[in-house]
């Protein structure tokens, strides 16, 4: 089983390659250019490096947000093309869940520090963030809330103390976090974006459970459709 993964929902382009449960290669890098100009080039590079072609890929693990509207469109348009032209199955992976997994590789001792929550905040513009809340359980990060579009003030109603905060929403709302949430643990910027290892780990898990779709049915996590003038019934 050969899996290719990609996420274009943040400024970082994320690509990964995995054979069964074995992670082979990947990166999460900000190339400072549009994903639309770079995505296919980088996919070709990683496949060529491993002497693979698209026909060798069993499934494409796709980050479906929430995140950049433009980035989502680029990623999903590419995924749909692979499905239509090469028959590659599509595995949707929530990008926000992938970001939450970064807490596992940060220097955080969940038990010793009695940390209650992990919270991802992604800038959604208009004074709001995309967010979800997780807990650390048996060595894993487990989602406990729905996916939300909220202000930082609203978010503070869900987490009152000892939370690990991750995501690019910190760039704008970091100072407000300190005034609204007691004892927050703020992870540095290197942990704010999806990592290829966790994208592939989650994609493999979903694919193994039979969670896959096609170009007609894949859906992005648009939590704020009005912002991008897209009605839910007309999702990509």
Image: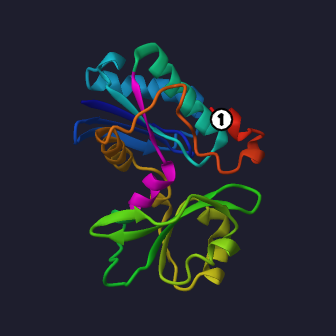
Q: Position of residue 170 (x, y in %)?
A: 60, 66
Residue situated in front as seen by the camera: 46 or 220 = 220
* Residue 33 showing in the rendered view: no
Position of 67 with respect to 115 (left or right) is right
Q: Position of residue 224 (x, y in %)?
A: 70, 50
Inspect the magenta stretch and tell me whether residue 131 lies in it.
no
Position of 122 with respect to 109 (left or right) is right
Q: Tag 1's secondary structure?
A: loop
Residue situated in front as seen by the camera: 88 or 172 = 88
Write down the residue under mark 1: 235
Q: Residue furthest top?
A: 85
Image quarter of the N terminus = top left
Above or below for 167 versus 6? below
Point 45% across, 31% down: residue:
213
Residue situated in front as seen by the camera: 213 or 29 = 213
Position of 227 with respect to 135 (left or right) is right
* Label 1, residues with CA under 10 Å away: few <14, some 14-19, many ≥20: few
Image quarter of the C terminus = top right
Residue extent of the magenta highlight: 88-102
Point 37% across, 64% down: residue:
141
The type of colouring in the image is rainbow
Q: Position of residue 214 (x, y in %)?
A: 47, 27
Q: Please tell me how many numbered marks the rendered image carries.
A: 1
Q: Position of residue 131 (x, y in %)?
A: 58, 61
Above or below for 164 versus 95? below
């Amino acid at each position: 089983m050969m899996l290719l993964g990609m996420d274009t929902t943040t400024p970082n382009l994320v690509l990964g390659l995995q054979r069964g449960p074995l992670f082979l290669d990947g990166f999460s890098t900000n190339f400072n250019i549009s994903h639309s100009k770079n995505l296919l080039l980088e996919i070709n590079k990683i496949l060529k490096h491993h002497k693979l072609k698209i026909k060798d890929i069993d499934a494409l693990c796709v980050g479906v947000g929430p995140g950049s509207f433009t980035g989502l469109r680029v990623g999903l348009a590419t995924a749909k093309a692979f499905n239509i032209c090469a028959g590659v199955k599509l595995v949707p992976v929530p990008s926000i869940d992938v970001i939450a997994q970064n807490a596992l590789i940060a220097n955080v001792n969940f038990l010793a520090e009695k940390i209650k929550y992990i919270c991802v905040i992604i800038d959604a513009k208009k004074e709001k963030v995309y967010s979800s809340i997780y807990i650390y359980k048996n060595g894993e990060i487990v989602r406990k809330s729905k996916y939300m579009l909220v202000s930082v003030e609203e978010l503070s109603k869900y987490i009152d103390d000892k939370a690990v905060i991750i995501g690019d929403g910190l760039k704008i709302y970091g100072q407000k976090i300190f005034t609204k949430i007691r004892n927050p643990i703020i992870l540095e910027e290197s942990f704010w974006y999806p990592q290829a290892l966790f994208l592939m780990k989650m994609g493999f898990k979903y694919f193994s459970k039979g969670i896959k779709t096609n170009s007609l049915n894949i859906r992005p996590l648009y939590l704020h459709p009005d912002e991008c003038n897209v009605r839910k019934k007309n999702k990509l």
